[in-house]
Amino acid sequence: MDEIDNILWLMIVVVVGGFLCEAAISELQLRAGERRRRKSETPSHGIDVSALTPKIQRVRQDYVATLHSSPRPASHKTGLVAASRRIIASLAFFQAGDAEREKPLDEV
Protein backbone atom coordinates (compact mmCIF):
# COMPACT_ATOMS: atom_id res chain seq x y z
CA MET A 1 0.00 0.00 0.00
CA ASP A 2 2.83 2.37 0.75
CA GLU A 3 4.07 2.22 -2.86
CA ILE A 4 0.58 2.95 -4.24
CA ASP A 5 0.22 5.94 -1.89
CA ASN A 6 3.54 7.33 -3.09
CA ILE A 7 2.49 6.95 -6.73
CA LEU A 8 -0.86 8.61 -5.99
CA TRP A 9 0.82 11.56 -4.26
CA LEU A 10 3.32 11.86 -7.10
CA MET A 11 0.47 11.98 -9.65
CA ILE A 12 -1.30 14.67 -7.61
CA VAL A 13 1.89 16.73 -7.39
CA VAL A 14 2.50 16.38 -11.13
CA VAL A 15 -1.07 17.47 -12.00
CA VAL A 16 -1.01 20.45 -9.63
CA GLY A 17 2.46 21.39 -10.91
CA GLY A 18 1.21 21.25 -14.48
CA PHE A 19 -1.68 23.56 -13.67
CA LEU A 20 0.67 25.99 -11.93
CA CYS A 21 3.08 25.98 -14.88
CA GLU A 22 0.22 26.57 -17.31
CA ALA A 23 -1.06 29.47 -15.19
CA ALA A 24 2.42 31.01 -15.04
CA ILE A 25 2.91 30.69 -18.81
CA SER A 26 -0.51 32.24 -19.47
CA GLU A 27 0.32 35.14 -17.17
CA LEU A 28 3.65 35.74 -18.92
CA GLN A 29 1.98 35.71 -22.33
CA LEU A 30 -0.67 38.13 -21.10
CA ARG A 31 1.97 40.52 -19.77
CA ALA A 32 3.99 40.30 -23.00
CA GLY A 33 0.87 41.07 -25.04
CA GLU A 34 0.12 44.04 -22.81
CA ARG A 35 3.68 45.36 -23.30
CA ARG A 36 3.40 44.99 -27.08
CA ARG A 37 0.06 46.79 -27.05
CA ARG A 38 1.46 49.68 -24.99
CA LYS A 39 4.47 50.00 -27.32
CA SER A 40 2.29 50.15 -30.43
CA GLU A 41 0.06 52.89 -29.06
CA THR A 42 1.12 56.31 -30.20
CA PRO A 43 0.03 59.48 -28.45
CA SER A 44 -2.98 60.91 -30.22
CA HIS A 45 -3.09 64.42 -31.57
CA GLY A 46 -5.54 66.44 -33.58
CA ILE A 47 -5.19 67.31 -37.25
CA ASP A 48 -5.69 70.64 -38.92
CA VAL A 49 -8.61 70.29 -41.33
CA SER A 50 -8.74 73.92 -42.42
CA ALA A 51 -6.81 73.09 -45.61
CA LEU A 52 -9.31 70.36 -46.49
CA THR A 53 -12.46 72.42 -46.04
CA PRO A 54 -12.35 74.18 -49.46
CA LYS A 55 -11.68 70.89 -51.23
CA ILE A 56 -14.60 69.22 -49.48
CA GLN A 57 -16.87 72.09 -50.46
CA ARG A 58 -15.82 71.73 -54.14
CA VAL A 59 -16.55 68.01 -54.03
CA ARG A 60 -19.97 68.63 -52.48
CA GLN A 61 -20.85 71.22 -55.12
CA ASP A 62 -19.66 69.37 -58.25
CA TYR A 63 -18.41 65.84 -57.74
CA VAL A 64 -17.82 65.01 -61.42
CA ALA A 65 -15.74 68.12 -62.14
CA THR A 66 -13.61 67.49 -59.06
CA LEU A 67 -13.15 63.85 -60.04
CA HIS A 68 -11.79 64.76 -63.48
CA SER A 69 -9.68 67.68 -62.29
CA SER A 70 -6.82 65.46 -61.08
CA PRO A 71 -6.50 62.30 -63.16
CA ARG A 72 -3.74 59.81 -62.47
CA PRO A 73 -0.80 59.80 -64.83
CA ALA A 74 -0.93 57.25 -67.62
CA SER A 75 2.32 55.67 -66.44
CA HIS A 76 0.99 54.99 -62.92
CA LYS A 77 0.56 51.24 -63.43
CA THR A 78 3.82 50.98 -65.34
CA GLY A 79 5.64 52.66 -62.48
CA LEU A 80 4.10 50.30 -59.95
CA VAL A 81 5.12 47.25 -61.98
CA ALA A 82 8.68 48.59 -62.38
CA ALA A 83 8.94 49.30 -58.64
CA SER A 84 7.70 45.79 -57.86
CA ARG A 85 10.30 44.30 -60.21
CA ARG A 86 13.09 46.26 -58.54
CA ILE A 87 11.98 45.18 -55.06
CA ILE A 88 11.70 41.51 -56.02
CA ALA A 89 15.01 41.55 -57.90
CA SER A 90 16.76 42.94 -54.81
CA LEU A 91 15.67 40.00 -52.64
CA ALA A 92 18.48 37.68 -51.55
CA PHE A 93 16.84 34.68 -53.24
CA PHE A 94 17.36 36.24 -56.66
CA GLN A 95 20.95 37.39 -56.05
CA ALA A 96 23.89 35.38 -57.40
CA GLY A 97 25.29 33.08 -54.73
CA ASP A 98 28.94 32.17 -54.10
CA ALA A 99 28.66 29.02 -56.22
CA GLU A 100 27.46 31.02 -59.21
CA ARG A 101 30.32 33.52 -58.89
CA GLU A 102 32.96 30.82 -59.27
CA LYS A 103 34.38 29.85 -62.66
CA PRO A 104 32.10 27.82 -64.89
CA LEU A 105 32.94 24.11 -65.26
CA ASP A 106 34.02 24.39 -68.88
CA GLU A 107 36.81 26.90 -67.96
CA VAL A 108 38.37 24.63 -65.30
Image (spheres, grey):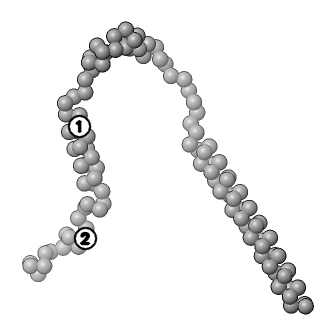
**Horizontal relation, residue 63 to residue 48: left or right:** left
Q: Quadrant of the N terminus?
A: bottom right
* Residues at marks 2 and 1, CA–CA distance in whole angstroms: 35 Å
Query: Residue 17 sits in which quadrant?
Result: bottom right
Residue sitting at x 19%, y 30% = 74
Tell me which amino acid carries mark 1: Lys
Total of numbered circles in the picture? 2
Instruction: Give the x, y percent position of residue 30.
Output: 67, 53
For the residues bearing labels 2 and 1, Cβ distance under 8 angstroms: no
Dividing the picture into quarters, in which one does residue 71 lie? top left
Q: Residue at x 26, y 17 (%)?
A: 69
In the rendered image, residue 68, in percent from the top left (x then y), is placed at 26, 18
Find residue 23 and report its horizontal and vertical position in percent: 74, 61
Label 1 sits on a secondary structure element that is helix
Compared to residue 62, the image places residue 15 above or below, namely below
Q: Residue 100, which numbered label?
A: none
Q: Which residue is drawn at 9% across and 79% down?
A: 106
| First in residue order: circle 2 vs circle 1 | 1
Q: What element carries label 2?
A: helix
Residue identifier under label 2: 98
Residue 90 appears at what percent x and percent y?
27, 54
Q: Mark 2, mark 1: which one is toward the viewer?
A: 1
Mark 1, residue position: 77
Residue 19 vertical placement versus 37 (above, below): below
Is residue 80 visible in the rendered image? The answer is yes
